[in-house]
């Protein structure tokens, strides 16, 4: 059989229903597309003026604007620009043929190979046809900057169009898109809704946009643009004050709380993107850590929280990113498999790490003041990304129980005489206050690690720092706390064996602090296992229980412990039981029944005094 070649044909009456219903997942994007095209038309004309085009020679590079006009009586929404406009031939080429982008032809003709194409959105193809998602009929009235006659193009929702010379309402130069709103578009006759869409998608477009909602205005009314054509991220950081950054933050995110600090990114070749990222103030650990990073394409809003662009562990950031190299109608699948996006993500990681280390090195006091707010972010970032850890490891600090701060290296250096390569920490200053006090009396610093993520973080540090271990204050005694001449007292040992569970080890030590009769330690490994099991159980998973490795240390230097040897057995047993229960209490290991019994015994002891 002979080889047959051909092309796929699409009948317009079949493609239009698809466009009307499925072109965009969010119908409101139609207004972004139409206004973007208008901004595109202005950008093109400005480019021609700068190139000295003959037809644009006498056109001043000023006074450019876009007008969005709502007419409830006529049920129309009109977008008008005074940009490049179109000739009849261009209308037939760019409007009558779906998805033929005029920007591509423009760039090829005027920009030349290797020249920047930034600023030309260029979807006067499918993007334009988004108007039919809300309109039954669309009129295009356009007059080219070249002086060619104006032309009118009218198309209904079936795809039938008419080109005519009925151009009485055509602009002096540029294009008007008149959308006759159908049932699908009636909601956009609400001026508040339409204004909200402009605020969302067009707030930073590079051409002044004016919105007329058709309401009567007073004589003194002076219209002003609804957008900011020079957003802060386009400026050089040296031109921006702290108040500029804070004001921009309040404006974009409606957040009354001031951000902790910010990072102004200006990446040139080969990445070519700009943005500002803010570390927000988090009041409590229970407050949402979900941030909001807005993605723009040449000042046109694309989407909120594109998680593929921002590393997962930095999603609590708020900010804006303007990425001209990404397509305007970007998809998640595109972002997930795009090398440019990966490079952006890596660059952001580097800038955040650089900012943290710079703050630590140049303003240690200010950095410490903000550490509680950024601590979780930094630890999570280190856990998720080894490269991030390597960049910020020297800027990681720890709060000590006395309120001061230290780095890991500083702590180890000061501790090498008493407990080399061991870091003692507490997770709760209140419940562990007895242990903390015991360590501090011996001149040993204790750091505070109160959050669940801290356990995972210190395990990371132990894997990175050879020989270094973290030990909770109730897990073991430091050697410097022990005196000489530890003596086992058999009678006392038997007394406690009758009280303490069999799985608990009992040993004697001579402690320097003679006022302390006994200490209950739970091994670090055992407690970490308990924490992990508790975490999984909280996630609804059934986990086996493991007995904790407990050691009851009796202080042979304590007068209370020594006195038990000569006491009446009954009284000695009551005192020993009280000592053990107090140890359980400081470890937070009392059950409801044991606590009830402890209170009853305590009241009984008081009655003997």
Image (tube, rainbow, N blue to C red):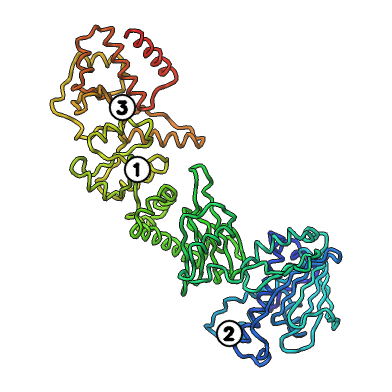
For label 1, the residue is 403
Choose top left, top right, bottom left or bottom right for residue 118: bottom right
Side of 547 relative to 124 (left or right): left
Dot 2 alpha-carbon crowd within 10 angstroms: few under 14, some 14 to 19, many 20 or more: some
Contact between marks 1 and 2 (CB within 8 A): the answer is no
For label 2, the residue is 111
Side of 69 relative to 117 (left or right): right
Q: Residue at x 72, y 89 (%)?
A: 146
Side of 370 relative to 88 (left or right): left
The number of discs equals 3
Q: Quadrant of the N terminus?
A: bottom right
Where residue 333 sits: x, y (%)? 57, 61
The residue mark sitting in front, 1 or 3, is 1
Mark pair 1, 2: CA separation: 61 Å
In the picture shown, does residue 333 fall above or below 177? above
For label 3, the residue is 550
The first of marks 1 and 3 along the sequence is 1
Where residue 369 sits: x, y (%)? 40, 50
Where residue 180 sits: x, y (%)? 82, 67
In the picture shown, does residue 39 fall above or below 302? below
Q: Nearer the viewer, residue 80 or 33?
A: 80
């Amino acid at each position: 059989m002979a080889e047959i070649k051909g092309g796929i044909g699409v009948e317009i009456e079949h493609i239009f229903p698809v466009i009307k219903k499925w072109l965009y997942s969010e119908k409101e994007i139609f207004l972004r597309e139409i206004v973007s095209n208008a901004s595109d038309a202005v950008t093109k004309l400005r480019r021609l003026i700068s190139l000295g085009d003959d037809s644009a020679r006498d056109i001043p590079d000023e006074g450019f604007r876009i007008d969005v006009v709502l007419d409830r009586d006529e049920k129309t929404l009109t977008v008008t620009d005074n940009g490049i406009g179109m000739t009849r031939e261009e209308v037939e080429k760019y409007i009558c043929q779906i998805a033929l982008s005029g920007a591509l032809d423009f760039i090829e003709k005027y920009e030349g190979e290797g020249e920047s194409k930034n600023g030309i959105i260029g979807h006067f193809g499918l993007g334009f046809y988004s108007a039919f998602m809300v309109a039954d009929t669309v009129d295009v009235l356009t007059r080219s900057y070249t002086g060619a006659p104006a032309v009118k193009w009218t198309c209904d929702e079936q795809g039938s169009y008419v080109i005519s010379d009925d151009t009485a309402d055509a602009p002096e130069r540029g294009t008007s898109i008149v959308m006759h709103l159908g049932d699908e578009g009636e909601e956009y006759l609400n001026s508040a809704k339409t204004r909200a869409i402009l605020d969302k998608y067009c707030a930073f477009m590079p051409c002044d946009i004016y919105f007329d909602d058709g309401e009567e205005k007073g004589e003194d009314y002076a219209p002003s643009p609804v957008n900011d054509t020079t957003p802060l991220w386009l400026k050089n950081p040296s031109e921006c004050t702290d108040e500029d950054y804070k004001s921009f933050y309040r404006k974009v995110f409606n957040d009354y709380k001031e951000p902790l600090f910010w990072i102004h990114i200006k990446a040139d070749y080969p990445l070519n993107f700009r943005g500002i990222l803010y570390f927000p103030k988090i009041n409590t650990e229970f407050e949402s850590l979900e941030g909001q990073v807005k993605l723009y394409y040449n000042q046109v809003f694309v989407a909120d929280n594109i998680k593929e662009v921002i590393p997962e562990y930095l999603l609590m950031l708020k900010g804006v990113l303007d990425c001209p190299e990404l397509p305007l109608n970007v998809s998640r699948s595109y972002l997930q498999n795009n090398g440019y996006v990966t490079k952006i993500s890596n660059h952001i990681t580097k800038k955040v790490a650089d900012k943290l280390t710079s703050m630590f090195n140049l303003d240690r006091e200010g950095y410490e003041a903000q550490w509680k707010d950024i601590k979780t972010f930094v630890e999570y970032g280190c856990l998720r990304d080894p490269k991030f850890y390597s960049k910020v490891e020297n800027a990681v600090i720890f709060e000590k129980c006395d309120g001061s701060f230290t780095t890991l290296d500083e702590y180890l250096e000061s501790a090498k005489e008493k407990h080399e390569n061991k870091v003692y920490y507490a997770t709760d200053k209140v419940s562990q206050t007895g242990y903390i006090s015991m360590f501090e009396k011996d001149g040993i610093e204790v750091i505070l690690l109160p959050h669940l993520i801290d356990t995972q973080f210190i395990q990371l540090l132990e894997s990175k720092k050879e020989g270094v271990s973290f030990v909770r204050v109730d897990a073991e005694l430091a050697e410097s706390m022990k005196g000489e001449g530890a003596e086992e007292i058999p009678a006392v040992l038997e007394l406690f064996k009758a009280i303490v569970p069999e799985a608990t080890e009992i040993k004697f030590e001579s402690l320097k602090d003679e006022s302390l009769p006994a200490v209950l330690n739970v091994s670090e490994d055992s407690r970490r296992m308990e924490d992990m099991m508790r975490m999984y159980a909280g996630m609804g998973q059934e986990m086996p229980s493991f007995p904790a490795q407990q050691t009851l240390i009796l202080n042979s230097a304590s007068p209370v412990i020594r006195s038990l040897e000569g006491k009446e057995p009954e009284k000695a047993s009551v005192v020993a039981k009280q000592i053990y229960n107090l140890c359980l209490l400081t470890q937070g290991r009392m059950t409801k029944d044991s606590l009830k019994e402890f209170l009853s015994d305590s009241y009984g002891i008081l009655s003997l005094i």
